[in-house]
Image (cartoon, rainbow, N blue to C red):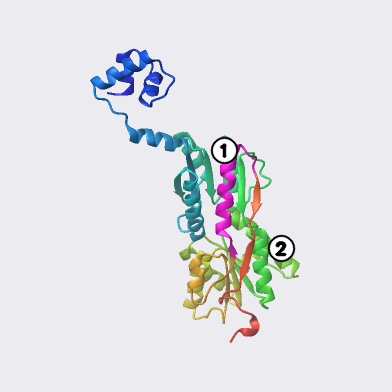
Amino acid sequence: MTIKDIARESGYAVGTVSRVLNNHPDVSQKARESIMTVVEKYNFRLNSNAKHLKQQAKKGIVIIVKGSGNMLFAAILERIQGLVEQSGYVCQICYIDEENNEMEQAIQLCRERQPQGIFFLGSNRDYFRNHFAELTVPCVLVTNSAAGWGFGNLSSVSTDDAAAAAAAIDHLIMLGHYHIGILGGQMERSQAAQTRYKGCVRSFAEHGRDFYPNRQYEPARFSVEAGYQAMGRLLNKMPELTAVFVMSDVMAIGAIRAIQDRGLKVPNDVSVLGFDGIELGSYLVPQLATIRQDEEKIARRSVEILLSMIENEDSAVHEFVPFKVVSGESAVSMNRRT
């Protein structure tokens, strides 16, 4: 027995039956009595679980995460999920490979789940440029900037990646390093890698230093294993290396191991400076020097902005959250090398 069966036997519309079963007042007494007679005849009980799931769907927010090994994303995701659920919404989390097309996933999820909003953790600008116009729900790009993209329903909250990467190179140069290498993402797939690369190039130029991408830059996926392998390739190309800037702390962990496996020491032979400021970095030996992103503020502002777009129909905004250079123990002055 379903609501449609009750409607058919009682002679009333499905909508009227639904209003009676949910105790809505805008139903005539005659209709209420007729419908309840059928309900009692068959001992019908409304499926409260289905009702609850339907209500949840109406307040669902999707979070699309590129890559499952990004510890910064994991920390931000945990904060976002907690804040969203405190606000009475339900999170639907979708992990995709860091090389996959997040727009295809978002469009499919909108068809299937009809969310009220979407968070994107990780992005490829080309995918957004080609397909984002198909999305009509409010969205927030988290940790990457969408400023200047021209989408009225897409906000962003991020660190100024170019400025932060420039600060990383500035710091290594200030420590007296001349032979500096960079481990970064695959720029054709990662907006963060593209922007951080530009910041690095800018810093070298401002300090009057030549930069040779084919020798000094080594691309890789954002993972420990990829960082390990990329560091090995960089050392092969640049054996005179004294410092390396790594575009994620996760990659830096692998890089440190690769340096040690070559019989070298961190930081005495090679200084390592990461990017993100994940909690694990402060427990490494040596403690990881890094560019720390403010994950708490990134998460909080992302949620505040998306909910304002959903509930108040606010316009898109784009914000940068301050970063901090954390000295750590893995990057030291050339004068302190032993």
Q: Nearer the viewer, residue 273 or 230?
A: 273
What residue is disc 2 on?
A: 202
Image quadrant where one finds the N terminus: top left
Kindly identify the residue that appears in the image at 61 percent across and 54 percent down.
158
Q: Is residue 207 left or right of residue 309?
A: right
Query: What are the residue bounds of the magenta stretch?
Result: 292-316
Q: Is residue 37 left or right of residue 313?
A: left
- Residue 279 image point, x, y percent: 50, 66
Q: Nearer the viewer, mark 2 or mark 1?
A: 1
User: Which residue type does callout 2 highlight?
Assistant: Arg
> Looking at the rendering, which quadrant does residue 240 occupy?
bottom right
Q: Is residue 248 visible?
A: yes
Q: Is residue 300 left or right of residue 37?
A: right
- Residue 126 image point, x, y percent: 60, 45
Q: Is residue 187 visible?
A: no
Q: Nearer the viewer, residue 327 or 335?
A: 327
What residue is disc 1 on?
A: 311
Residues at circles 2 and 1 in contact by the CB criterion of under 8 Å: no
